Image (cartoon, rainbow, N blue to C red):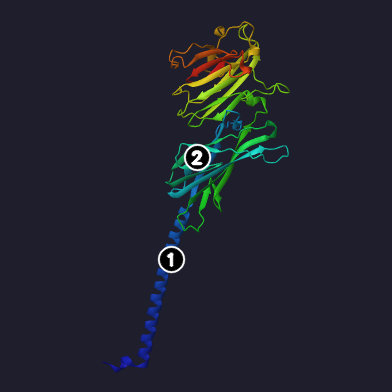
Amino acid sequence: MSASLFSPGALHRVARRHVRNRLSFARSGACLALAFLAAALGTASTASRAANANFEVAVVPVGAGASSPASVSVSRNGLTTYAAYKVSITNSSGNTNNAIRFDASSVVTGDLTALNEDAGATASYVEAIGTQACSGSGSSVTCSFPQMKAGANNSFVLIFSAPPLAAANHWAANAAIALGWSFDYASGNSSSTPSSILCNGVQIPSPPCTGSEAIALVTTATDSILAGFTTYIPSFGGTFFTGSGSVLPPSGTNLRPTAAVKLAVPPGQSLTTAQVDVTVTLGGATGDTTTTNTAIVQVPNNEQLFRTFATIELRRDASTIANGAKISNAVVSYSHYDDGRDLGPLSACPANGVPTAASPVCVFSRTEFTKKNAPTPDDVGDWQFILHALENGVSRW
């Protein structure tokens, strides 16, 4: 082997080439490390975007119209009415999200004592229609869904009972049932990491997403509540009526009705709202009466007949009946349309009491109350007509 290979100059040149090679490898390793780091950051960024869920959450009071807010009649003696809110939750994230949670709680506003303090009225949770995911007690409810895939929707109706009215003069003009709600989900990170939500197009920096909706509460201190009612129909049906549910004070009021309507809806009908409005005008259809009573009954069912007939009770006060008039001669008319365009007299129900598709509304019974059969002394002399109905419409008697 040549000795010149080990000369000082040769050794120096070899050392310099070795250093350059190490630097070249180092630079290559650094670039590779940066590439891996960039890929990792990109993956983390993608995961972060996936965790930023995008949800559409809509809470709408049932019964609200284009130009009028939703309202519910206050509950009275023997009558419970119901407020309802339709909830719709849609996952617009483009990915699956877990542990979906919707919480809601009702608060009664305008419930004031003579000292303008909260009188403590509550609107209690009753049930959720359209889902088994909700449970609640008192005025609160929680609805939990384990998972929602991209594009999935959960829609349901939450029902609360309207508070009873103990004394009409402690209700303010702005009485309402306000539903405060919140929505959140699990981001998939550790429990200490807050989730991030795009809720109804708005980024929520500190979840949950929240909101509030109110349903006006109409009290018995007004003519409108005694002349009608508005309620949601729970799955178990219900019986609803106009009037106060008890005899009103005879002095100092013009709210004492001379006509009343009771509507009984059987369970399991999958119906939504029920509304009845009664008007009384002077002048009878015949000489037997001094007034004409009209009741508009609205129980929307997409123009389809009810699966089971509803019972409608029509009452006429004795003060509007002429001496010697006979209930057997009284005419009860009906129209399918609110404007009464096809108004005509009703026939008696078949022997089994069940109306038919050809005659969806019929008169089941007529009763003139006497001292022997009147529910209360105040009912003596009143007329009562019981209708069985498979559809909405206008009744006149």
Quarter of the view holding residue 1? bottom left
Rendered view: 290 above or below 306: above
Going from N to C along the chain, the mark reached first, 2 or 1, is 1
Rendered view: 198 above or below 5: above
Which residue in the structure is indicated by mark 1?
37
Residue type for callout 2: Ser
**Does residue 340 show up?**
no
Residue at figure coordinates x 50%, y 37% from the top left: 127
Residue 237 locus on image (x, y percent): 49, 28
Quarter of the view holding residue 317? top right
Q: Nearer the viewer, residue 131 or 325?
A: 325
Quarter of the view holding residue 25? bottom left
Q: Mark 2: few, some, or many residues within 10 Å (few <14, many ≥20)?
A: some
Rendered view: 367 above or below 161: above
Q: Nearer the viewer, residue 107 or 68?
A: 107
Which residue in the structure is indicated by mark 2?
88
Residue at figure coordinates x 36%, y 89% from the top left: 11
**Helix, strand or loop at disc 2?**
strand
Q: Is residue 24 left or right of residue 291?
A: left
Residue 380 locus on image (x, y percent): 61, 14
Q: Nearer the viewer, residue 199 or 35?
A: 199
